[in-house]
Amino acid sequence: MLTAEVRVRYDGDWTAKLAEFDVFGEFIASTFRNHRYIGMLALETSEYEATLDIIRSHEMVDSVDVVEQYETPEGRCAATVLLRGRLTELTPLQALMYEGYLPIGPTKLKNGCEHFNLLLGDRDELSKAIELLSEFGSVSVERITKDFRREITPSRAEWQELLSSIPTRQREFLNVAVEMGYFEIPRAVTLEELAEELGITKTTASTHLRKVERKLITFLLPYINLAVKDE
């Protein structure tokens, strides 16, 4: 059994037209019925309005509804959008599923190309998948492995819930602590000096630190344990 990441450029589709922008996306949910398409796309881009204009203007897209939108720490725009459209031809995902291939996880969008992680019986089956996808545009194999391993990462919703749950004061404390080198080895600043910089007592600074560390570690540790194979 193999798993392979296959990349295809869907010529003529809006996904290919986004190659001129720095866009990363994940189709986190989708369905097809009676030549209609509904999909949920999570995207991140530095050209938000231009990206939405490209999607909206495509002939097969009927509507684009923004479910959520926020700015990332890097200053890029992240959004989740609901797409509705008409299908006048098979999409790469439909073609794969109709032929019995098993995509694992969401379809990813990078540099104007769609990326599929496929579970395959052997290399011959991979070759047939490449031949099938070649009808849509250029195809390449990004990765092949004999080991199946489910990706263990928090969902976008879980990340957002964590990030939005950190109080402003704790977030400010973390920013100052990083800027002043508190987490360096050795430390460039003491907890007492951090407290003085923020105009709070050392006890209050310690409380802020322990609370935010506990929240972050409690969130991440289960995923760390799941991701590491037993020795």
Image (cartoon, helix red, strand yellow):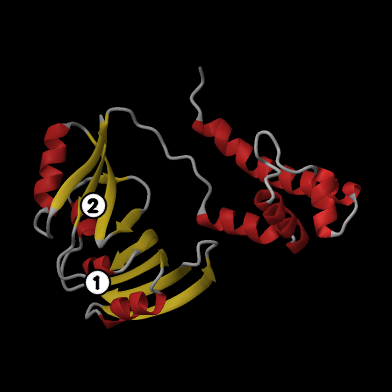
Query: Judging from the image, what secondary structure is the residue with disc 2 in?
Result: helix
Marker disc for residue 52:
none
Name the residue beneath numbered marker 2: 97
Say if 23 sits above or below 209 in the image. below
Residue 211 % position (x, y) = 78, 47
Q: Amino acid at mark 1?
A: Trp
Q: Nearer the viewer, residue 104 or 182?
A: 182
Q: Quadrant of residue 31?
A: bottom left
Residue carrying label 1: 14
At horizontal 9% and vertical 48% (from top left) the residue drawn is 131
Give the number of marks.
2
Q: Residues within 10 Å of mark 1 (few under 14, many from 20)?
A: many
Q: Would you identify the image quadrant in which residue 111 lies?
A: bottom left
- Residue at the location (68% across, 55% down)? 175
Q: Nearer the viewer, mark 1 or mark 2?
A: 1
Snapshot quadrant of residue 8: bottom left
In-image side of 169 versus 31 (left or right): right
* Residue 60 seen in this snapshot: yes
- In the picture, measured across the screen, residue 66 lies left or right of residue 18, that is right
User: Does residue 129 sit above or below 162 in this rendering?
Assistant: above
Q: Mark 1 or mark 2, which has the lower sequence index?
A: 1
Image location of residue 201, percent across then percent down: 90, 52
Front residue (pair 108, 184) = 184
Q: Is residue 49 above or below residue 3?
A: below
Q: Nearer the viewer, residue 23 or 28?
A: 23
The answer to whether residue 6 is left or right of residue 23 is left
Q: Residue at x 22, y 81 (%)?
A: 59
Amino acid type indicated by mark 2: Met
Q: From this viewpoint, which residue is outermost toward the top?
A: 231
